[in-house]
Amino acid sequence: MGVRNDEGNTRAVQERGRSGVLEPAPAEPAIIVCGLSALRGIRRARRIHDLWSWVPLDLEEQGRVLEAATSCKPLIDLDELARYGFWGGEETEKLELLVAAPAARRRVPHVRCCCTSRSLPAGSICRVAPGLYATSPLYTAYQYSRGRAVASVAMLLFELMGTYSMAEEATMTIAWGGVWPHGERRGGGGASLDPTAGGPSLALGGVRASGAGEPADQVHYACDPAFSCEDLDAFISMGRFSPRGSFTRAAAVALPHAASPMESVLAAMLGAPHRLGGFALSALPGGIQLNRRIEFEHDAVLMSSGMPYAICDVFIRSANAEIEYNGIGHEEESARVHDGQRNNGMRGMGIKVIVVNREQMRDIQALEAIARSLYRDAGVRYRDVNNGRRALQDAWLNGLRAGIGLRPA
């Protein structure tokens, strides 16, 4: 197999170097999507359960592909990139491509080149299709963290380690600090919620307007985690990231197994340390766990009318308590009956159940009172609010909400 040059002659795949040793011919040009464009594609791949087809590269192949990375206009097929979710065609959108050296940059409309001269951790680049590559979910999250607040980065890590994905159409608006889907997007109108229009569906985690036009829950889709907590820790140790950077600080807050954006906000608000504006429940013995499965004993099964187990949204082991977030799906009559039976089963297991609704998710005082009660149940003294602490808590909550495209509380 060979590659033809301009004169039509065929070069062998392997060429003999000056030393007489066979050396590999230069790699074929590669397009490496990175940054927000890669994040958009990751969300699309997770939504259709196709992320498994992305093949992480080892260090050797990763180096070859990076050296062959280009941003030449003739090699950029926007239609193909759109099929993979990397390109949305918004007015002010830029396709972000990764290259190894400044000399590989090209001035191409709607394209922004990112140059990296440092060696990347193994698996930072994935093969999506022949000649088309993208940065991995972990490296994409690191790129996203540059210049962004810890709260926004934490929300992305919750999502990528969780069992849900935001809609790919939300990527640019949220990254630009906008409200999605009700707010206007920079360079375009809000995304449609009509399934026939190709936008996000209301089938799972759908958005319904409340009295003030605020969504009850943010649009999301069920999917498998993009990476685990152990993968994140290994990536940070290999990358030697600054402990003061947004990425490492957000990684210390993020938890795996979140099932919805609002669950992530609740867990980050309750679990983050006081210095960030949270209530530090993660510092209690055993920390907090998301979507923990509790197997019911005999009496608990009877009390719940036959339920064999329950899933706890937020479980605090040291307080023997769970916090249940009641979103839009819990407001229907059948859901209320199910929740009552489930909570009876939890009482049969001796577990305290605290229910938080969407209005309380905007109420700092209510959330802090819940945190104080859990500290008491765990036998630990809660640190009182100091001067200026409320403003820090408000800022943290609003930063978390902004990270999933919601208006400030």
Image: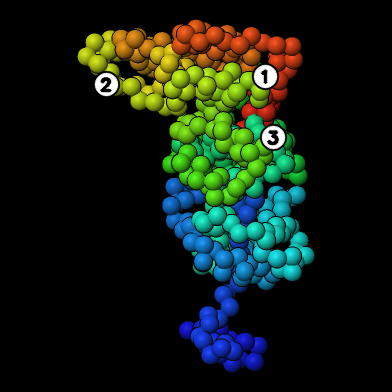
Residue 149's disc number: 3
Dot placed on the residue nearer the N-terminal end, 3 or 1: 3
Quadrant including the C terminus: top right
108 displayed left or right of 406: right
- Marks 2/1: CA distance? 38 Å
Task: Please tell me which residue is depicted at 28% across the width and 18% down the height of the picture.
Answer: 296
- Mark 1 residue element: helix
Task: Please tell me which residue is depicted at 67% across the width and 10% down the height of the picture.
Answer: 385
Task: Please tell me which residue is depicted at 40% across the width and 14% down the height of the picture.
Answer: 320
Task: Please tell me which residue is depicted at 42% across the width and 27% down the height of the picture.
Answer: 291
Kind of residue at badge 1: Gln
- Mark 2 residue element: loop
Residue 393's disc number: 1
Depth check, front residue: 245 or 307? 245
Q: Position of residue 378 (x, y in %)?
A: 46, 11
Kind of residue at badge 3: Ala
375 displayed left or right of 40: left
Q: Position of residue 134 (x, y in %)?
A: 57, 57
